[in-house]
Image: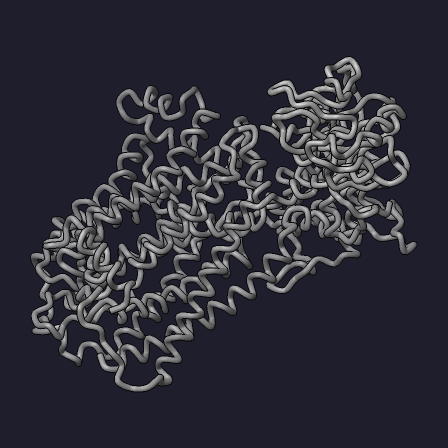
Amino acid sequence: MGSLTKIARWIDYRLPVFSFIDHELRAYPTPRNLNYWWNFGSLAGITLVIMILSGIFLAMHYEPNVATAFDSVEYIMRSVNYGWFMRYLHANGATMFFIIVYIHMLRGLYYGSYKSPREVLWILGVVIFLLMMATAFMGYVLPWGQMSYWGATVITNLFSVFPFGEDIVQWLWGGFSVDNPTLNRFFALHYLLPFLIVGVVVLHLVALHQHGSSNPLGIERKEPRDSIPFHPYYTVKDLFGLGVFALVWAYFIFFNPNFFGEPDNYIPANPLVTPPHIVPEWYFLPYYAILRSIPNKLVGVLCMFSSIGVLFFLPWLDTSKVRSATFRPIYKWVFWSFVFDCFVLGFVGAHSPDFIHVTLGGISNQFLGQITTLYYFAFFLILLPILGKFEKTRPLPTSLSEPVLRKGKDRRAAVRILIFTFLMLSPVSATEPTAPLPHEVWSFQGPTGTFDRTDLQHGFQIYKQVCSACHSLKHIRFIDLAALGYTPAEIKALASEYKMPSINDDGEPAERPALPNDIIPGPYKNEKAARASNNGALPPDLSLITKARVGGPDYVYALLTGYQSVPPKDVQIPEGMHYNPYFPGGQIAMIPPLSDGLETYSDGSKPSVNQMAKDVVTFLSWVAEPELETRKKMGYKVLIYFIVFTVLMYIVKRRVWKNV
Amino acid sequence: MTEETVKEKTEPTRRDFLYLTASAIGAVGTAYFAWPFLDSMNPASDILAQSSIDVDLAPIPAGTAITVVWRGKPIFVRHRTPEEITAAQQVPLSELMDPEPDKERVKKGHDQWLVVIGICTHLGCIPTGNKPTQTRGKYGGWECPCHGSLYDTSGRVRRGPAPANLAVPPYAFVTATSIRIGTSEAAHG
């Protein structure tokens, strides 16, 4: 016996950690017939750990203050080493976590996993889900963009329907509106709640290991050969599942990081302007749809809370003695129609209440929401209790080890999970801009796109000569321009053209030449000065413009090239405004900024308006996503790694399971 | 640990190789996954960019020093008078607590410029003496207000409790009247 084993024994005799691990993770007897739907519990656990880990490191750089929160997130994205990776991992992680947990819950619903003796296991799961929703909501507030702010306002106002509602809401806010105290406490709670989740997860696992996992047949294990040890059988199966999951997650992090986000959240919070299309994150859309479908405020809020509250009573609402839907011919259909109903609710939530569904015979979105809400509750409160009494179930097998039932189940489950995941990714809102945008071809788009350095330098020239007269770039330092191909000497010379405010030795305000590490100074001292010079309009900062508008680069390009000097007959353009069909409302204060012959490039060419617009949009896209090239490059390495990992784990799994 | 250890009867097989490969791939992946998080705690790009600064020497009158901030630390840039240079050069090394000739503490041909990190080597206070009107102690350099350490006109410690001379940061002359602190290479431009 080695000395390590001796030490381990000595510790284990006093603190039985090793026996515990051996008993609960290795030898733990698990039903032999679990299919791929049973992968999602461990995936949820792994996701929780990754979320906490990335969250802790993000918190080292984030500043929970209304004055600096938005900028600190941009600082993470641009200056912190791998900051963009940590943030995209964390933000997309929330989406991944909900996909995993929704599948995990629906699996329980389909196979009746919540039935005796696993009622408490299920209830603990619902508690975890509630804590997750609170955590996700407060996390979404932290970047302090427009959606953060208005999401926080709307959700906290939900509590105003209760008795003493106004007082409750003020208590939640710590003021008379969502403001700095709100942001501070949300940050504190966003950091705390995940650890509470860990605590409840431990209880969830204790309850799970008391009676062991349920299984696709829904009958209890009777003989020893019904069980296999958790390790290596399920560890390797879970690792294979992890590989597939990581591929999906990594795709979004590296190649489509803002797919689930709203462009409006790249606009700093403004307490005086609500964005025109305010929608919650996709995972809240069904509840949001229930809230909106009911025309009475109190009833709507109560229904929304009940839609989750009803889950606590599920073990008693479902009266069927048979657990698995496999043997419940009618419930099976009721279940899938419930899943479909949830997707439709999500779809309803993503569209405005006035939206008319032409394909559905012209019914309004509100009406569709009401039908689906009705079905949602009917499923739990009417169908589940009644079905258990009247449904004629199919005969149950006598043993888990009856081989006939096992064949092919596993692979079918895997295929269904894939289809299901993609369905869940679909209900992302598509808001139509004012006029349909023409689509340009951009060098930096697509999975392999990169920025053309010449276009970037030309674009910077246009920015400097034209845009910067009214717009700022407050997240870009001169030194960042090195990425455009400028030398340190050129950057230093460029910086010295600008003046920075400073204080001289006598304490008087003075000016000094800008240094390479300074932010490129904007044209105005403050917002009032900017408005005064622009007919009351505020030229937006351009650091994030291609991320902060629906349509991104296409929108900015269309705006720059889409001015029409003669507006249509039915449009009245007031003095000082200009007609541009791509700008919401059609009236824009910005004068047409580009004209032919305005600039000469260093190669002597005279670019056309379209060429200038294209170059400057390329430059602004780089400004918004300077990490883009690094991100894609790293993405390929990560994808290749996880493909190898997944294939290997699949082969190992096949080997390990050969004789089961 | 379990009582029974299951021993493979056979020699290393293709299966063992497969398991080892899978474990190795997993371990390497985990290590790579940890790196972005650890690296995120290193200085960010804007902080690294501050790691060198340029100082214009022209406005510093002889006999005084200015304080500039480099990497969050005070740097004393002192324009020494001829008398101060002579005093620094002529003191015998045997009289010094931390013997170091003056010529190794300044750049060749720039004897009038002394650049030191302005942090007392005892416990981190900032010594006084940049302006002629401030207390400089009897060696004419700096005096630490916390525990009374004295430094001479070469920034060398002459009376404790400080154990070592004021440190000289890496720097180089860009032109005759400007230096770049943070790099010891002769700068180009």
Tell me what residue is drawn at x 66 percent, y 43 percent.
B48
Q: Which is more toward the observer, A643 or B182?
A: B182
Tell me what residue is drawn at x 40 percent, y 22 percent.
A174
Asked if residue A623 is positioned above or below residue A401 in the image, the reply reads: above
Residue A509 lies, in percent from the top left, at: 77, 18
Residue A125 lies, in percent from the top left, at: 24, 49
Q: Residue lying furthest top in this view?
A: B133
Q: What colour scheme does the image use?
A: one colour
Residue B126 lies, in percent from the top left, at: 65, 24
* Left/right of residue A641 with respect to residue B86 in the rendered view: left
Quadrant in which residue A540 is drawn? top right
Quadrant in which residue A35 is drawn? bottom left
Tell me what residue is drawn at x 70 percent, y 29 percent.
B157
Q: Quadrant of the C terminus of chain B?
A: top right
Q: Residue lying furthest front in this view?
A: B94
* Left/right of residue A342 with respect to residue A406 in the rendered view: right
Tell me what residue is drawn at x 62 percent, y 55 percent.
A628
Q: Please tell me how many numbered marks the rendered image carries.
A: 0
Asked if residue A47 is positioned above or below residue A654 in the image, the reply reads: above
Q: Which is more toward the observer, B33 or A642?
A: B33
* Left/right of residue A71 with respect to residue A45 in the rendered view: right
Is residue A397 visible to us here?
Answer: no
Asked if residue A84 is positioned above or below residue A254 in the image, the reply reads: above
Residue B86 lies, in percent from the top left, at: 87, 28
Asked if residue B81 is positioned above or below residue A639 in the image, the reply reads: above
Is residue A41 visible to us here?
Answer: yes
